[in-house]
Image (cartoon, helix red, strand yellow):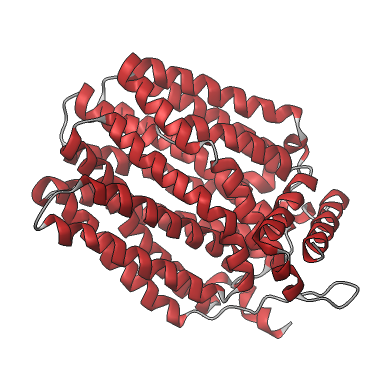
Amino acid sequence: MTDRAPAASLWGNRNYRVFLVIQTLSALGDSFSFVAIPLLVLHSTGSVVQMGLVTGLTGVASIVTGLFAGVIADRFDRRRLLMLSDVARCLLYALIPLVWLFANPMWLIYTVVPLTGGFAMLFQVTYVTVVPAIVAPDQIIKANAHLYGTYAVATVGGPTLAGLVAAAFGPVAAIGIDAATFAMSAAGLLLVTLRPTPRPTDEKGADEKGAERGGVRGEFLAGFRFLWAHPVLRPLTVLLSLFIFLTHGMTDVIIFRIKEDLGHGDGTVGYVLSAGTVGTFVASFLVARLRKGIGFGPSWIGAVTLGGIAVGCLGLTESVPVIGALSATMLLATGVAGICSMSLRQEVTPGHLLGRVTAAFWTTHYSLGPLGAAAVTASAAGFGVARVCLAVGVGVVCVALSGTLTGIVRAEAPDASRTPAADEAGEAGEAAESAAETA
């Protein structure tokens, strides 16, 4: 097809290049709030429990949004949805520095941060559906690796800069910088053109309007049924739910460890988190080779196992450089696993279902995240960081090894991802969508 001809080279694809630059800029801003929000809560309250509560509330907002984010992404113009999400987050984050000029109301944090989490979920679901509309199908994992790599480049410097800005001007200033980057990202999306997504009809000629009459619940269930029918996505969703429960609050635990247990300042927090994101950068270089060489299953299981070992060791050292190295190892592992799982989803899911499948996947496996964040941070405050990290690490390793008993270990390499089982799953997903349309 002529619209795929330029995709012979990723770097020859103008839409891809622009999209890559935009997402790098947005990631740089994200890294500021990633550091600044927990620091602002800690400065204002001195409580790791409240840090975990904000993180948990954000997770709840993401889950609620995920119930309908996929439906929205499959119904409406996806580029406009990305722009809407960026503009909304820009305005919400800008409220914090503006209000902080006059007062320091914690209720604003508890309101704004979860709302931005909801728009972030809408953006992330739509973002996953956009990549296959920019690059060729056989370039998806490379494109995801590049995007993940540039994200890492941005976030290597971002946390350091955020820590320095927070130390010099306060965490509120870093949040203001994040708001500005969302505005620039929204403007840049005007330069990106997406290939249209085909809207298939069923055998009786019913189009997507029939699905709309089925309601949000029916359309969401179409995505969930596709997940459940797929022999790899089904166990992957279950295991990732457990993984998110265990690790969702680890950033707060690391920040608490550095500041409260070891007595270091905001700048040190930024350096450690920056060192950690080096692992994300390395993951972007390794993932395509790993998946091609040993396949999806061994890549995912091995990466998560390595991440669990790194988490378990975090509480056993008081050395800041070692904590940074372990953070890098943890993010290297989760980076490889994350790119593999997202690429597999994009490869085996029909385009018109991708938003709903992505939303069902993320909503399901993030459902335990808020509870996990609250439990892990409260446990760290009550029992100490060392014990909690060890327990979490052991749990993550058990989750990874459980994958050897499922279809994950038998998943094929990218060029064989369209197996008969995957086709069967696709038919099940389409059947589920038809059922939703007639509901």
Q: Position of residue 105 (x, y in %)?
A: 18, 48
Coordinates of residue 272 in the picture (x, y in percent) = 28, 37
Q: In this rendering, would 135 be left or right of 389? A: right
The answer to whether residue 86 is seen in the rendering is: yes
Name, please, the residue furthest toward the bottom: 2
Report the number of discs. 0
x, y percentage for residue 389? Answer: 41, 21
The residue sitting at 40% across, 69% down in the picture is: 22
Q: Quadrant of residue 326?
A: top left
Q: Which residue is nearer to you in this view: 221 or 415?
A: 221
Q: Is residue 209 above or below residue 266?
A: below
Q: Quadrant of residue 329?
A: top left
Of 293 and 93, the residue lying toward us: 93
In this view, 155 is above or below 214: above
Q: From the top left corner, tell me how far across and down residue 229 is, in percent.
A: 80, 47
Q: What residue do we see at 32% from left, 71% from top? A: 183
Quarter of the figure with the C terminus:
bottom right
Q: Which residue does the image show at 23% across and 61% down from the upper left?
A: 95
Left or right: 406 as drawn, with respect to 5: right
